[in-house]
Image (cartoon, grey):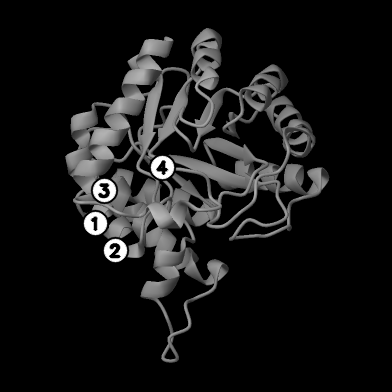
Amino acid sequence: MQPLSRVTGLPAPGRTVIVGVVNVTPDSFSDGGEFLDPDAAIRHGLELMAEGADVIDVGGESTRPGAVRPTTEVELRRVLPVVSALAEAGAVVSIDTMRPVVAAAAIEAGARLVNDVSGGRAEPDLLRLVAEAELPYICMHWRGHSVDMESKADYVDVVADVIAEVSVQLEACVAAGITPDRLIVDPGLGFAKTGEHNWELLQRLDELDVLGVPLLIGASRKRFLGTLLAGPDGAPRTARERDAASVALTALLAERGVWGVRVHAVRDSRDAADVVARFVRRP
């Protein structure tokens, strides 16, 4: 088990950090459209806070395979009321965006963390913005936008290739002025990766320690879990029927000392992280 990392500017609860997801989108794979209305999204975020989320991750762009990007104006309209209300309520809010304009507005509205699924590759100016704001930054492994990312799931060795490519992304982060103590890496499960790639990354997660920064894992409700749990007819479990498997992964990752998990079922994931923290504590 690895010692739990700390990230400057973010909660350090002495266990794996629970990042709750609020999708303000019409087409996310897990809850498509359920929280598109800002008031519904705000209520959901407050519920996740009450259930024990340490961070609330608010996003206005679906990154499911094949998704088409919204305009900047639409993304801003979706996320800003939600970020502002949750920050005012005392939440540690993360803005999930690839766009500097959206990140800047969300930071002004109270966001304290930037979660960029492109890891600085979509719009490099975002890195300089984060550096100037002196905020933590989640750098995800990324090979391209959702509309065609599945065609880019080609690796010689997925773990070695992810390490090599993320290392370049992290160098760009530091060059832009983001300090290493504010960096977090997400290996990007499901982003230009098959189910087998996801499992190999999870099974060999310790190899990513060479990157020298804390890890955030976003496996919650993803398709590879639904495929694993397919019924006798071969039909994958639906997204909401994958929560128990997602919580099982939270427990396994927490036992390995992973910094954080990005999840939909916050209460159960928080319970799992708390149990692991007590189980591994020595008298």
Q: Nearer the viewer, mark 1 or mark 3?
A: 1
Residue shown at 56%/11% (left/top)? 133
- How far is the residue under mark 3 from the one under mark 2? 22 Å
**Residue at (54, 67) in percent of width and height:** 239
**Picture disc at residue 196:** 2
Q: Secondary structure at mark 2?
A: helix
- Between label 1 and label 4, give the one nearer the viewer: 4
Q: Of marks 4 and 3, which one's residue comes earlier in the chain?
A: 4
The CA distance from mark 4 to mark 2 is: 17 Å
Spatial CA distance of label 1 from label 2 is 6 Å
Pointer 2: residues within 10 angstroms few (<14), some, or many (20+)?
few
Q: Amino acid at mark 1?
A: Glu
Query: Horizontal placement of 254 versus 20: left or right?
Result: left
As drawn, the label of residue 143 is: 4
Q: Quadrant of the C terminus?
A: top left
Q: Position of residue 31 (x, y in %)?
A: 65, 60
Which numbered disc, 3 or 2, marks the residue that appears first in the sequence?
A: 2
Q: Are marks 1 and 2 in contact (CB under 8 Å)?
A: yes
How far across and how far down the image is residue 247, in percent? 42, 59
Q: Secondary structure at mark 3?
A: helix
| x then y, percent, for residue 87 | 68, 27
First reached walking from the N terminus: tag 4 or tag 2: 4
Q: Nearer the viewer, mark 4 or mark 2?
A: 4
Q: Residues within 10 Å of mark 1 (few under 14, many from 20)?
A: some
